[in-house]
Image (spheres, rainbow, N blue to C red):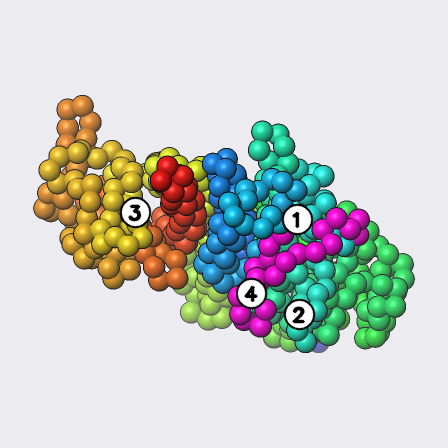
Amino acid sequence: MNTRFRFALVTSLISLAITLPLVWVVVANIYIFLEENTDNRIKIQTNKIIYELNSKLEKASQTANSVAHSLLALKQNEMAYPHLVSDILKANIVSNPEVFGIWTVWEPNTWNTPKDSVPLERLALYWNKLNGKILLDTLVSFNDPILGQYYLQPKKNRKLTILPPTNYSIGKKQVILSSIVYPIILSNDFQAVVGVDFNYDFFQSTLTKYSNYTSLSMAIYSSEGRVLAHSDRAKIGKLISIEDKDFYHDELDFLSKALKNNEKLKKSIYLKDQNEYVTVYLTPIEVPNLTTHFSILISERNDKLYADKQDLRSKIVFFIIIGFIVFYAIILLYINKLIKPFYLAVDYILSIANDNKIVTIKSKYKKLSDIRGNLFKSIESMYRSIKEKEQMIEEQNSVAEWIRVGQSKLYDSMRGIFSIKDMSENILFFLCKYLDIQIGALYLHYEKTKYLKLSAAYSLTYDDNINNYINIGEGLVGQAALDNRIVSIENVENQYFYSSSSTLKILPKNLIILPFSLNKKVIGVLEFGSYEVINGKKLKLLEGILENIAIALNSVMIANKISRHRRNKKYL
């Protein structure tokens, strides 16, 4: 072997000895990346499920709160007659299709008895949807120490209570029901409780919706270990027990304690029926304003991650062998020219694997016409793609959090309000300030009228252009109410309305009109004027809260109507 080949061989061996440790460092970092990628994927899936479940549970809680305040208003006005209480329960179950039942139980002698009527021993009404029909039943066993916990527990706690999920037989169907219960307290005296029943079918539908995007085994458990949703539907409604074929006794006990204590964990356990190890991710679901706990359990097969690592290792070994042969053949002519770019490429790969800030690739390497130039371009493109996706996910999470906070603050501003004017102003003022909107108005449509009445205004100049009453179908607001659709106009040129300061009148550039309705019946209209276009996350927030605004205002309007009716009847 001549000197040239010996030099090439020695140089190749030395280069290989230097390169191999670097390659294994890259491999180790990629292994870490694979595990972190799995963790992040599961975290994203879990956050999506939690966000959707929280929205539905918060809506049920809002309904219970609204009914409780309506009944409290009746009691304060000494009009808590059984038929009026029943009417409010029925109206709310009709306007909330996701609610299974609404019920109330009153203490003896706390409700009002109409003249010439037979006194009731107890007022215990239950409106429910049995087989799709809305029926009225009477509750029993509310004083039983075991069966009556739905009444005795909130009576004792005197605060918002959510009852544990329980299996019930309704017709020929087994369903899992729970109740959100509000106590009614007047002058520190306990009067009654109001409960909203909801079933857990939406837990399963939400789980199924997001299971389509992954190959994971997923389940949702209550704090006592009851299965509320599962990839295997046969396990829904059952409790974790030592007979469960999924887990060994010690692992089952560990999971049961974690569920009870509302803990977050990641643990590798052994599945008996499948004879394999899996990594279990347990994430608690925190529901605002509720005292219950749920947890999402996701099982990721370890063999899948192991197979990915093995496949990666085989590919790397294969490419190392091929690369060594090619390297040995080419190094005779291009030793220095070839080694330097590939070392630099390894540094860039290590930087990306370790999530370090990448050094800008020199243009002379990207301009190379062979595979080396494509390699550097691919590395740079891959890094930019990763950063763009991370930024996009952060922006989406930021928008979702902004919307969630806005919804929560709006619900807080509506709680405990019994006046139509006060609630209208709270809603309008909060939205204008939170969304940075300069002008706003809120109109209400009262039953059996053909016009909208101005209920609240924000930063408006009250001149001839502002009407306290608008006929349905008249102007932009009236037409939007008639069509029950959102109207948005940009670059407003005509004199529509102005915002005012002490010295100026300013014309808004964008006008948006949003009707809010229940069961296609318009309750009112929100009208906003802004110096900037209202779109994106602001419009998404507005569209998402219209139904809740309609529910809140409709409940207050019903309570006020009943109050006026009873007063008029009393004076007659």
Q: Position of residue 468 (x, y in %)?
A: 20, 41
Residue 399 circle label: none
Whether tag 4 and tag 2 are in contact, CB under 8 A, the answer is no
Which residue carries the number 4 mark? Answer: 135
Q: Nearer the viewer, mark 3 or mark 1?
A: 1
Q: What span is colored magenta in the figure?
A: 121-146
Q: Secondary structure at mark 3?
A: strand
Distance Cα–Cα, label 2 vs label 3: 40 Å
Which residue carries the number 2 mark? Answer: 170
Ranked by sequence position, the earlier of labels 4 and 2 is 4
Q: Which three-letter amino acid code belongs to the residue tagged 1?
A: Glu
- The C terminus sits in image quarter: top left
Q: Which three-letter amino acid code belongs to the residue tagged 3?
A: Leu
Ranked by sequence position, the earlier of labels 2 and 3 is 2
Q: Position of residue 89 (x, y in %)?
A: 52, 54
Distance Cα–Cα, label 4 vs label 3: 31 Å
Ranked by sequence position, the earlier of labels 1 and 4 is 1
Distance Cα–Cα, label 1 vs label 4: 21 Å
Whether tag 1 and tag 4 are in contact, CB under 8 A, the answer is no
Q: Which three-letter amino acid code belongs to the residue tagged 4?
A: Leu
Which residue carries the number 3 mark? Answer: 444
Residue at 81% x, 62% y: name it.
240
Distance Cα–Cα, label 3 vs label 1: 40 Å
Residue at 24% x, 59% y: name it.
482
Magenta span has 69?
Answer: no
Q: Which three-letter amino acid code belongs to the residue tagged 2?
A: Ile
